[in-house]
Image (spheres, rainbow, N blue to C red):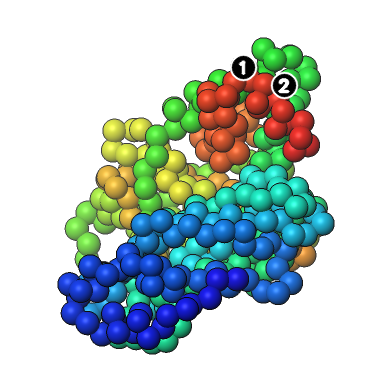
Amino acid sequence: MFRRNNIPVCAALLALAPALLHAQAASPDLRNSFQVRLPAESPVTVVSADWGQSNAAARGGAMQVELHSTLVLKNSSPRRIRAVSLLVLAQEVTPGGKGSVTVPSLDVAPGESFPIRIDLRLMRPLAPVGGALVEVGLDGVLFEDLTFYGPNRLNTRRAMLAWEMEARRDRKALLAALESGGEAGLRGALLAAVARAGAQPRMPMQVARALPATNVEGERSVQFAFLKVPESPVELLSGEARMAQMEARAPRIELRNGSRRPIKFVELGWLARDTEGREYVAGTLPAEIDLSPGQQSTIRKDNALRFSRPVSALTAYPAVVEFADGEMWVPPSVAWQDAKLAQSLPVSGELARLAGLYRLKGLQAVVQQLRSMR
């Protein structure tokens, strides 16, 4: 565990003029006030922490902390680790005072060490409030058997479990391609993933609070289109939003639980079509629900979905579903056998990672990972 060892110096620096604070921000004493705090029973321990060019500088009435660090952690548990999430905290209540770093697609055996890179910009009050400038803590660890450890303050369990299920799905599909078509079959599957990713342009979507508006110029009601994903436990029935240029306000979607299990969370994927007819991957929108088997419900969001260019139409599809018992559903491999779905559903992070590994280190590096991470 890393401990603060010169608080009087740190406090004095913060009390000086902003110019002096900036000049001294990268000093060893200030860097020593960055801390890693892990619980005694943590399944990972700190091997080393290099704070690199981390620094702090006054920005108006607040202090901006630039955190650039490589942490080396060790798996101190008896199980293999698949994902880790860290909570990085400068100030709990200050806007921009906390962030997170989540690393999926790991395969860390007991006793092995692994690096995590942190590059974040955080804000905190300029006046001294006690404690370290920044504390790094553990939010969660996902193990090979899909069990989870951690406070889960950022609800990272849900995201890490969904990513791991997508990764297992895609590794299984690539192994099937290898077993049925040999190295040529695997190479073809990887190149197809690269081509699919290149053919899926992205349009950033920002979810923001919608401002009250009664007469927005050019605003119109737009009905959503839906993609029907095989084996989805939810069926999207209808939906609409108020559309004006680059913003869709107050989206509403009616859905039905078509499974035999209660559902508590749905994440919808979004595709946006611009005024020239081109379709873009736009992001996802999460929704906490309480949906019994066979029951219908309506997701209503008092948000505005803001895009980077004018949008003429929106398409939604179920991307992640969490059941009441904590189990997750993600689209199955069979979905990519449908031409429309294969064109529209985004390439997973794991598939993109393995395609990148193929480009950098060749096919045998991919084969080795697929066989070691069955």
Task: Indicate which disc, 2 or 1, sits on the residue closer to the N terminus.
Answer: 2
Could you tell whether 156 is left or right of 16 in the image?
right
Q: Position of residue 247 (x, y in %)?
A: 31, 55
The three-letter amino acid code for the residue at tag 1 is: Gly
Q: Is residue 297 above or below residue 243?
A: below
Q: Residue at x 62, y 62 (%)?
A: 46
State if disc 1 and disc 2 touch (CB < 8 Å).
Answer: yes
Across and down, in percent, residue 334 comes to: 70, 32
Q: Position of residue 285 (x, y in %)?
A: 49, 57
Foreground residue, 19 or 84? 19
In the rendered structure, the answer to whether residue 252 lies left or right of residue 182 reads left
Q: Nearer the viewer, residue 339 or 5?
A: 5
The numbered dot on residue 231 is none
Question: Which image quadrant is residue 160 in?
Answer: bottom right
Residue underneath mark 1? 188
Quadrant the N terminus occupies: bottom right
Left or right: residue 179 versus residue 32 is: right
Compared with residue 91, is residue 141 higher up or lower down, i.e. above or below? above
233 or 150: nearer the viewer: 150
The image's mark for residue 177 is: 2
